[in-house]
Amino acid sequence: MKEQTAEVALKSGLQARQAALFVQEANRFVSDVFLEKEEKKVNAKSIMGVMSLAISRGTTVKIEADGVDEEEAVQALVEMIEKAE
């Protein structure tokens, strides 16, 4: 299992369009991928789960993955949310 914390730099956070792109990216990987905010952990491959976290800019989240491509999954998703729009 690989995990890493990251601060969301996206202007609109992980709302609507950005959440959909995040979920789409998470689904590219075989590994199980999870997103956690303040002790609430959801499946990062679920749009409803990601949206339920209501993640805004500046929020610190934890991304974790477990599987054959866990390293690549965590790295790609951290890079995605840490880059400013």
Image: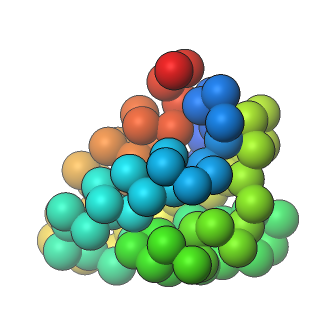
State the colouring used for the structure image: rainbow
Q: Quadrant of residue 58?
A: top right
Residue furthest right in the image? 38
Residue furthest top in the image? 84
Name the residue at 63% across, 67% down.
51
Above or below residue 30? Residue 61 is above
- Count of residue discs: 0
Q: Is residue 52 left or right of residue 26?
A: right
Position of residue 26 measured from the top left corner of the image (x, y, whole percent): 33, 62
Task: Please name whichever residue, 38 or 53, is drawn nearer the observer in this view of the structure.
Answer: 53
Name the residue at 61% across, 49% down.
14
Name the residue at 70% across, 73% down.
52
Name the residue at 75% across, 60% down.
54
- What is the quadrant of the N terminus in the image? bottom left
Look at the image and tell me whether residue 76 can be seen. yes
Q: Is residue 37 left or right of residue 22?
A: right
Position of residue 34 measured from the top left corner of the image (x, y, whole percent): 50, 72
Look at the image and tell me whether residue 34 can be seen. no
Position of residue 41 measured from the top left corner of the image (x, y, whole percent): 66, 77
Residue furthest front in the image? 16
Above or below residue 24? Residue 34 is below
Task: Please name whichever residue, 75 or 26, is drawn nearer the observer in this view of the structure.
Answer: 26
Position of residue 8 measured from the top left corner of the image (x, y, whole percent): 64, 37
